[in-house]
Amino acid sequence: MPIPGGAPAVSRTLLRDDVFGRLRDAIIDGTFEPGEQLKDGELATWLGVSRTPIREALLRLGQAGLVVAQPGRSTRVSKLDLRAARDARDVVASMHELAVRAAARSLTSDDLAGMRAANERFTAALEAGDVQAALRADDELHAVPVSVSGNLALQAVLEQFTPVVRRAERLRFTSTDGAASVDGHERLIRLCEEGDVEGAAAVAFDTWHSLQP
């Protein structure tokens, strides 16, 4: 059949990122358990894609420390390594501190309102015991200063190391300790609104660094 003209091409980058995100989230939320073998053919069938984006996603997950690949043998979900989680936590905390320091004075009223709305969703999710929704709202809140900072290198570092932290953080949000983050978020937003850059940066760092894997 003739190929119709003018139709927008499917973004390979979008497909690749979506596959990576789905697999990453399935590891973080425990759908795929530590030690479980991941077969690219089965994953491709599950997500309805070819094996190529699956293999690319598995490589990225390996770089993030979420899977361990044995060439010619198998790829398995990695076990939670406490040392690796602490190292990742330190890096992630520093990156969020840097992002807030760079963005605090540039946050608009809409940005701050978006952060407050995210914290409200975060609070509601904690009260409902919905860990995934809490993590999603937490991501949305912290993504605001990260995006406003405009630092692409910082964003790349967070993309690599945040998933490791999230696996440990998921355990935190199943306990009452997660409620402490609500107050931390409120302080962060207030200090940004007041233009207290150093104070806001310190809260951003402490919010992430307080995680005890």
Image (cartoon, rainbow, N blue to C red):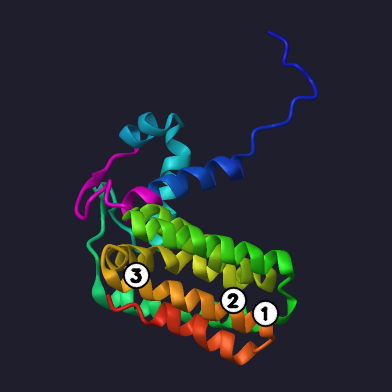
> Hey, what amino acid is under mark 3?
Gly
Q: Is residue 117 left or right of residue 77?
A: right
The residue that label 3 is drawn on is 178
> Hey, what amino acid is under mark 2?
Ile
The residue that label 2 is drawn on is 189
Q: Is residue 22 left or right of residue 79?
A: right
**Badge 3 element:** helix
**Badge 2 element:** helix
The picture quadrant where one finds residue 175 is bottom left
The picture quadrant where one finds residue 145 is bottom right
Q: Is residue 17 above or below residue 178?
A: above
The residue lying at 27 percent from left, 75 percent from top is 213
Residue 192 at what x, y percent from top left? 64, 81
The Cα atoms of the two marked residues, 1 and 3, are separated by 24 Å
Crowd around label 1: few <14 · some 14–19 · many ≥20 (10 Å): some
Q: Is residue 183 left or right of residue 9?
A: left
The picture quadrant where one finds residue 122 is bottom left
Q: Which mark identifies residue 193? A: 1
**Who is closer to the viewer here, 128 or 25?**
128
**Badge 1 element:** helix
The residue lying at 37 percent from left, 29 percent from top is 45
Q: Which mark identifies residue 13? A: none
Pointers 2 and 1 in contact (C-beta within 8 Å): yes
Q: Is residue 27 above or below residue 86?
A: above
Residue 211 at what x, y percent from top left? 34, 77
> Hey, what amino acid is under mark 1?
Glu
The Cα atoms of the two marked residues, 2 and 1, are separated by 6 Å
